[in-house]
Each structure stands twice: as C-alpha cells, then as structure tokens.
Amino acid sequence: MHIFEREVDGHFYRIAAQSVWDPERGRSVARQIVLGPAGPPPVADLAATRTVGGRALGDVGALVWVAEQLDLVGHIDRACGPVGAQGGPTAGELTVAVALQRACAPGPKRDLAAFLDACLPRVSCLPARAFTGQAFHRVAQRVTAAQLEQAQVAIAQAAVARFDLSTDVLAFDTTNFDTYIATTTPGELARRGHAKSKRGDLRVVGLGLLVSESGHVPLLYRTYAGNGSDQAVLTACLAGLKALHEALAPGGTRRRPAQRTLVRDGGFWSPQLELDLDGAGYGSLISLPLGHATAEQALQVAARRGAMQPLGGTLRGVRAARLRAPLGDLDRTLVVVESAELLAGQKRGIAAALRTAKAELQTLERRTAQGRLARGQLEARVAKALAREHLASFVVPTVAGTADRPTFTWHVDAGKRRQLERTRLGRRVLCTDRHLWSTGRIVQAFRGQWKVEELFRRAKKGGVVPWGPSYQWADGSLRLHTFATVVGLTLVSLARLALGTDASARALLEYLAAIRATVVRTTTGAAGRRPTVLLAPELSAEQRRAVKIFELERWFPHILSSMTVRPMQR
C-alpha cells in the first residue's frame, strides 16, 4: 500500500492508495482512502480537551507489515480468483482482515467493521463498512479447498524466502475444535468424534498442522471432519507436503538436497505410515507409544545402571539413552529421553487419580462386605477405577470368594510405585531412521513437535488467535474461517521472529497493543466542528524498536515525536 500527501483547498491530507486486479474488467483498479490530515495538530488549550477514544496501532500494524512482506492478499487472490463481491473486498482482503481480528480483538464477524474502524493501519482502501459477516460467508461458499491449498503453498514459499525459515524438519500434529452446530444441520466437516475437550455431545472440526523447526511457523494445514483418524489425516497431507517442498526447492539456498524429516507424537504410529513416508522421501521421527513392545525393550535397557547419560549444550540437564533395534521389518534408532517437567506433571496426575481411585475402592470394599455386589460387577468396577494414570501397575486388588459372595481387599505397593517412577514415568521413547544424527539433534528436533501443541493452545478458546467461538455452520465458512485462523497464527509467529524476541506470543501482542494513539477532542475557539487530534503514547525501549522494525510511522507520523531520547541532565 502506497502512502502519500495531497493538498486539497489549502490543507494537506495523508492518502493511502492501492492497486487491485479486477478479473472481470481485465485491468487494475486503483483505490484510495484518506487517512487523516498531514499538517501539524492545532494549538489548543489543554484544559479544554477531552479524551474520546483510541486507535489500535502496534499489534495491528505489526501484523499488517508481515502481511505486506508476504504479499498475503495477493497470494490468496491469485489462488482464489474473482470470488469477491463486485466493488467489495476480495477473498484475500477478507481473510487477512478476519486473521487480524482473531489475533488482536477476537469477536464475531458482525464486529469486523467496527474493529477495522478502530485501527490506524489498513488492510484495504475500501471503507470498513464493506467488511461484513455476510460478505465473508458469500465469499466462503465460492472458495474451494484446492484453491486454499494453492494459497497455502504460495504463502509458505513467501514466508520461507522472506524470513529464511528452515524446512528440513517439520513437526505435525492434529487437534479439533468444538462447534455448537445442531445435529440436523447438514455438513461434512462438523462431526461427532474423539473430542479433545471430552465434549462427546458436540460436533467438532479437525485441524492438522505442519510447522517449521525455525520460528515454529505454520506452513501447511488441513481441515478435516471431526470423526477422522490422525493417521488418515497425515496420509492425506503427504501429497500437499510434496507439493510444498517442490515449491520451496527452487528458492532454496542449499547446495545439497535437503533431508526432509517429519516429526510427530505417538498417536501417529503406524508401520504402513512409516513405509509411506519412506516412499515419499521423508525421514521419520516419532515418539513411540510406551505400550509398544520395542518401546518396552528400550525402557528396560535405559533402566540399567549408567545407561542414561547427560546431554550438553542447550540440553544441559537432560538425560538420554540410545540404542539401535529392529522395529518389525524396519531398522530404527531409539532414544529414551528423560524430562523432569514431564515427570512432575505425571506425578501430579497420578496423585490426583489415586485420590479418586482410593475413594472408589473404599466404597467397593464396603459394599462387598455388605454383600451388595456380585463378583462380575466388582471386577468390572475395580478395572474401571484403576484404568487411568498407570494405577493398575502399583495398586494391587485382591478379589476372591464365590460369584455371589465375593471378598475384596486392596493396597498400594510403594515399591512398585517407585519402580514405575524410576523406569517409566517422565520418559519418552523416540524412534527415527536418522541414524547419523546425534542424540542431542534427535531430542532437539522432537522438541519442535511441542511447539505445534503450543500453537494449538493459542488457537483454543481464550488463546492468542482463538478459533472459537465460531458462528459458522456451512462447510465453506468453516473451512475459510479455519484458514483465516491459521493465517493469524502465521502472522503472529513471523512478527515474533522479525522482532527477535524471546517473549511469548501473548506477551508480544500485549506490549504491541499498548502502542495506541489516543484520540482527544479540542476546542480552538474558532467556528466549525471541534477537531480531533491523535496523541502519541509514551514508549519503552522495546516498543521503540518495534516502531522501527514494523514501520509504524507510516500510519501515524506523530509517533516519531515519542521516539526522541532526551539528553541526560548533568
């Protein structure tokens, strides 16, 4: 977007202009919008001023800057074609506007125009009132899944080239989001399945995400029906993953072919999937389910004295054991890694589950003594009480007696509990075909998978870029809404990468959101409407650096007045 000044009737104004391709006319169409007066603010009596509001600048301006660096609107429009309303916003403009709203002020799309009006940075030169929920839903019904996939690949290619992202190692995971769509409403995406929120009464929409190792930026996603399996989603992603890497290859700067590796957790374990990945030319790094026979073997080896060795560098304090073993017909390197944080979390979970199980077992013991339970019922309820958090491995129940008059006792075996904590809890078994990688490299690559879970936490309710609450019900609207959410996650990740900060995404957006222009109304004593003036905020050192990096002075030149460092008094 080009910003310049123009004189009208002796007054100077700042104008934003953009050129948009009109496929129906076969030519570019120019758009312009007035940002505000370019002259100095009027001199006013401070006693006669009144604060009337504010305008968002820092958080929206940073994400708009990232979107412009990627040519986000252009990539989406070229992929989706002429699907926007005539004279209204295009698919790209609507998607980016919704992504900004999800990241900066989550709310329904009926508030989209009000959100854009309250921002100084602009996505489009169209008036904010053109961005409505109806326009979004009309565009969503015309955009296809294939077009969104084409836009994904183009955006990923631009992000890798502009921000120098590494794509050798990609982490994959899935989640789902609750919807409140009625059972009778037709649709293929919102289905009842294994909901992560444990809400079996709701229809859910699934999301699969591929994230880069550097910057943890979403590069590829899939929206799938809520009753789909994780393995099926990853298998469906292989074609898109191949297209993604083929698109990234021409722009790569490496002299040798990249070793592509896919990282995922134990829910994606499948021997056939391992073969599919190998056939597609991808290496594999996965956390094996601890119940797998090979994982049990690796845990037994790691339990030997001296098997767990400390790692160095950034993994100081982490211990791991390494071995090479066959996994069916596959030759794999196994790494047993110990995590103090995981161990502490599992201990808390076991303690909470044990309290609940003790109460249930005491109830069963009392009712059995009263002769109120048959043996079959007793055994079923005991198994259910000990089914969680490894309780069955150290809580020892004893059921005896006849079918009609059973007896029941139980106790907690402290030795077995200590053995469980020493050999199993807090440990993961990593499995890979990258035999030449060091143990530290394997552990570091797998930790990237945790970043996908962090992105999912951001997309959950109350997160940084929440997917819900969603008021869509049609498949097309759900698909485009999910795409806009992923775009919002991408913008936040890239803004954090551009700023080079170690702050969390939430902390980043909070101190960027504090860069706001205050709107005051003044009294000049002259005739006519009282003018409004934008006042620059006080900025911290980190905020001043963000102003420079994200070029926020384009939207609010007076913010440079708060960038002046006062000389120290001597």
Image (tube, rainbow, N blue to C red):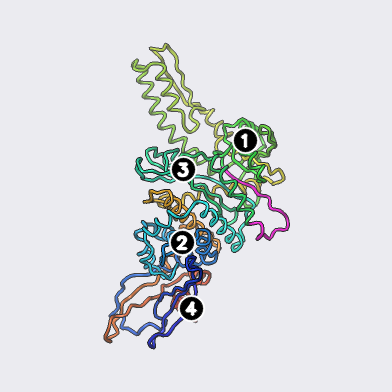
The answer to whether residue 146 is magenta is: no
Q: Amino acid at mark 3?
A: Ala
Query: At 30% from the left edge and 83% from the top edge, which residue is drawn?
Result: 45
Task: Judge by depth and name the residue closer to the eye, 410 or 392.
Answer: 392
Dot 4 or dot 3: first in sequence order is: 3
Dot 2 or dot 3: first in sequence order is: 2
Q: Nearer the viewer, mark 1 or mark 4?
A: 1
The residue that label 4 is drawn on is 564
Task: Judge by depth and name the residue closer to the eye, 34 or 455.
Answer: 34
| Range shown magenta | 248-264
Q: Amino acid at mark 1?
A: Pro
Q: Is residue 35 left or right of residue 163?
A: left
The residue that label 2 is drawn on is 96
Q: Secondary structure at mark 3?
A: strand
Distance, label 1 to label 2, CA atoms, is 40 Å
Residue that sits furthest to the bottom in the current view:
10
Distance, label 2 to label 3, CA atoms, is 24 Å
CA neighbours of label 3 inside 10 A, class few (<14), some (14 to 19), many (20+): many
Q: Verify CB contact (< 8 Å) between mark 1 and mark 4.
A: no
Q: Which mark is residue 225?
A: 3
Quarter of the image for residue 39 reads bottom left
Q: Secondary structure at mark 4?
A: loop
